[in-house]
Amino acid sequence: MKNVYLLILVLLLSSCSSIPISTMLKFRSFNEQSFVALNGSEIRSKIIVSQPFTLDLEKIKLSLTLDNDKGVRNFTYPLDLDMQKTIAAQDGFFTSTPAKTEYTFKLSELAVKNFKETQNLISDQFKGETSFSIAAGFNEEPTEGQLVTLSILLQLDEEDGYFTLIDNADIDVGNED
């Protein structure tokens, strides 16, 4: 459990420098109507993590936070593994990248139902902020100084495809001090 909280904290702290500008520009016009128009069965998330680390599939969750004058509401949507593949290490002349594991997740059937209910709560009268986050944990216990390279992509609809939330962020998850 400690790893999940640590990973979320690290992602929040380091994500500002790892979010591509194209993602920020894409969502400058995302509003309540955009959210209500989403099809929960098209939502996907990709998490790419450097080996030897693997994700604890039981701890993967997509969360939505709605913050307005009535208060803050948090919604959590369990994710099901849709696909998993290994990306081979690449050695280049100047740089090399380690082998990685790419996980693709979709909303579970219950999550799709809950997502529709959340959309029904939101109308064009909603004034406030909406934010998505993805929580994950590792099966392995990282050691101090050990880096994990992490990318997180999100697809809200099939037409637009994936956009990058975190792009190859190096995270020192083994240092808990």
Image (cartoon, grey):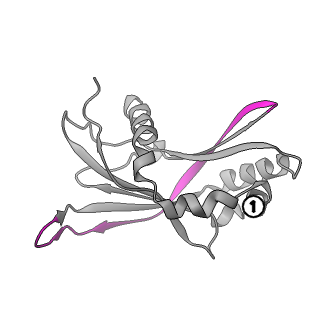
- Number of callouts: 1
Going by the picture, which residue comes out furthest to the bottom?
159
Q: Which residue is mark 1?
A: 34
Which image quadrant is residue 103 in?
bottom left
Question: Image check: 154 left or right of 142?
Answer: right
Q: Quadrant of the N terminus?
A: top left
Residue 10 horizontal/vertical position (percent): 39, 37
Depth check: give the residue in front, 66 or 52: 66
Residue at left offset 68%, top offset 51%: 110
Secondary structure at badge 1 equals helix
Q: Which residues are magenta?
A: 69-95
Question: On the rendered structure, is 81 left or right of 63?
Answer: left
Q: Quadrant of the C terminus?
A: top left
Q: Main secondary structure of the magenta part?
A: strand
Crowding near pointer 1: few (<14 within 10 Å), some, many (20+)? few
Task: Determine whether, in the image, residue 97 is placed left or right of residue 133.
Answer: left
Residue 173, percent from left and from top? 29, 37
Above-or-below relation of 97 to 111: below
At horizontal 89% and vertical 47% (from top left) the residue drawn is 125
Instruction: Identify the amino acid type marked 1.
Output: Ser
Where residue 115 sits in the image (x, y, percent)?
72, 52
